[in-house]
Image (tube, rainbow, N blue to C red):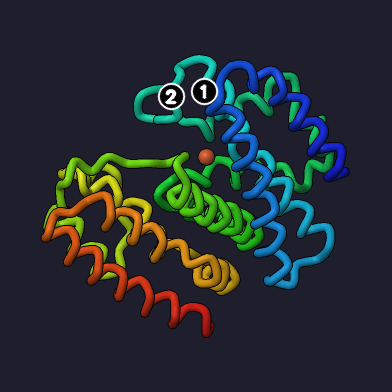
Amino acid sequence: MNLENAKQEFLQYTDPYRKVGERCVLKINHTFRVEALCKQIAKSLSLSKKEIEVAELCGLLHDIGRFEQWKKYQTFEDSKSEDHAELGIQILNTKDYYKKYFTEESIYDIVMNSIRYHNKFKIKEGLTEKEKVFCNIVRDADKIDILYLYTTDDIKLDLKNEPFSDQVYENLIHKKEILKENLKTKGDILSVALGFAFDINYPESFRILKEKDYFNRVIDIYKERNQNEKMQKQLEEIRKTIENYIEEKVKC
Ligand SMILES: [Fe+2]
């Protein structure tokens, strides 16, 4: 595997999609940021030089299904189209296209599982320890970059001035991740991103989140946008919960 060649192949593959829509360009940029985050997290775990490159490759390929998804359905919502992770795996397997990125069969399962489980609520039981590490690196990196996008205009939710439902609020206060199926109010849509705090795996990821201050920035933005009194109070309590949680985790 040659990472530079893999990046070139990715740029070549995605180039035609730039014209398909602005949202595809956003995903190309997201991919390269996730790749860099994977490198940073992998380094913090003292992985070998080769393993750090594999982590970067996983980051590079994790969203490869997004471009066809947009082209076919004009949406990034899996529930309204299809699972973009599975679509990505399908694309890479078609005529062994993955061999343009890597030829070592020894990393095939690592790469494919990191793609398959980057967008699932949990990773499957029964993966090897090594496979789990690469899945978790990509999951952390992806969540960190999604939080970054929440601080920009690229992800802008309209909460219609509704607060969190009591159930979703209780989950966040008890440090539980949020399932999309449990969303009830418009305000609840924001809870998925805030719940990311409780599904982060590595100390380095927590350090990045603390340094970039993403959770506080997102909470500030939505306190400004949603003046509902109940929501204002809920967000302050959630802010405290997340701050304390990250503080504990960076020390690990
Ligand atoms: Fe994704």
Q: Nearer the viewer, residue 194 or 225?
A: 225
How far apart marks 2 and 1 lie (CA) works out to: 7 Å
First along the sequence among labels 2 and 1: 1
What residue is at 30 percent from the left and 74 percent from the top? 241
Q: Which mark is residue 123?
A: none
Q: Residues within 10 Å of mark 1 (few under 14, many from 20)?
A: many
Q: Which mark is residue 69?
A: 1
Element at badge 1?
helix
The amino acid type, in three-letter code, at marker 2 is Thr
Instruction: Answer above or below: position of 18 versus 205.
Output: above
Q: Residue 81 location in percent, x, y?
A: 41, 22
Which residue is the site of mark 2? 75
Report if the CB atoms under discs 2 and 1 are less than 8 Å apart. Answer: yes
Element at badge 2?
loop
Q: Residue 163 location in percent, x, y?
A: 15, 53
The N terminus: image quadrant: top right
Q: Residue 174 location in percent, x, y?
A: 25, 70
Residue 22 position by quadrant: top right
Q: Is residue 102 visible?
A: yes
Instruction: Answer above or below: position of 190 versus 31.
Output: below
Q: Answer yes or no: disc 2 within 8 Å of ligand 1.
A: no
The amino acid type, in three-letter code, at marker 1 is Gln
What residue is at 19 percent from the left and 41 percent from the top? 160
Q: Is residue 1 visible?
A: no
Q: Nearer the viewer, residue 220 or 20?
A: 220
Q: Residue 232 location in percent, x, y?
A: 19, 62
